[in-house]
Amino acid sequence: MTTWSRNPVPTEAPNEASPDMPTWRAVSELADLVEIFDPDVQVCVWQRAVDASIAAYLSGLERAGTLQAIETLSAEDPPRLARLPAGPDSVPGLAALIDDLAFLREITCELLGCPAVGLRFARVDHAMCPGWHIDRVGLRLICTYEGPGTQWLADQGLDRSKPGLTRMADGVHIRAGAGDVVLLKGALWQGNERFGAVHRSPEIPPDAGARTLVTLDPLWQA
């Protein structure tokens, strides 16, 4: 596993500075995800591609319709995903998917020093949260494996204190690619009460197929 360039700090760590100029950052190396600890950074995205075997497995789930699996995992627990189809032809892709989910769990636990994560794996045919919003969490990891990725505002300096955030947030937005690891800082991150990543779920055109994604929330009590 990657050796991080700073000691992991939980979201409730004291003495965290408040942002001066909220922004987002893209990184090309896993270790650079520590840039999320910069008080100004509200979104940090590690750009990577989806494993070919995972993509092939998910493309074969078209007949399965929408799916959802919710699990609480300790730092050592492997994801189970018992509700996902597991036929003979799907074994390599499903195994690769479970391995990647475990890898994302490991990233979350090591980066934040948390003992567990809440994992939600979903295959959806509509935007779950279509309006611009801020999550009431400390930090959330999102990875879209299939379909359009999470969107966030390029200008994170939006005044969040005014009502009508959805109506005001009409500026240029960024969309994550398939496989990208996106860290979204929430309003409950220490010192971030007036901020938080302004983001939304993408619209899914009727003929575009499903969107498959995972979210991981750090947990401090397993």
Image: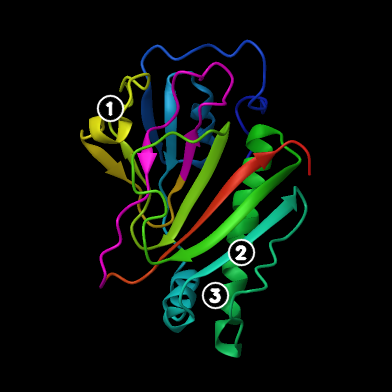
Majority SS type along the magenta span: loop
In the picture, measured across the screen, residue 209 lies left or right of residue 3, that is: left
Badge 3 is on which residue? 93
Please provide percent x and percent y for residue 152. 34, 39
Please provide percent x and percent y for residue 92. 58, 78
In the picture, measured across the screen, residue 182 lies left or right of residue 162, that is: right
Which residue occupies the foreground of this view, 91 or 126?
A: 126
Q: CA distance from mark 3 to mark 1?
A: 37 Å
Q: Nearer the N terminus, badge 1 or badge 2?
A: 2
- Point out which mark residue 43 bears: none
Residue found 44% across the figure and 15% down from its top: 19
Whether residue 1 is visible: no
- The label nearer to you, 3 versus 2, is 2
- Kind of element beneath mark 1: loop
User: Seen from this angle, which residue lies furthest left?
Assistant: 171
Question: Relative to residue 66, is residue 17 depicted above or below?
Answer: above
Badge 1 is on which residue? 155
| Disc 1: CA contacts within 10 A as few (<14), some (14-19) or many (>=20) | some
Range of residues picked out in magenta? 182-207
Badge 2 is on which residue? 69
Please provide percent x and percent y for residue 80. 70, 67
Q: Nearer the N terminus, badge 3 or badge 2?
A: 2
- The label nearer to you, 1 versus 2, is 2
In the picture, measured across the screen, residue 97 lies left or right of residue 133, that is: right
Q: How many marks?
A: 3
Please provide percent x and percent y for residue 177. 35, 53
Mark 1 is on which residue type? Asp
Mark 2 is on which residue type? Ala
**In the rendered structure, are the residues bearing label 3 and label 2 in contact, judged by CB atoms less than 8 Å apart?**
no
Mark 3 is on which residue type? Gly
Question: Relative to residue 138, is residue 128 depicted above or below?
Answer: below
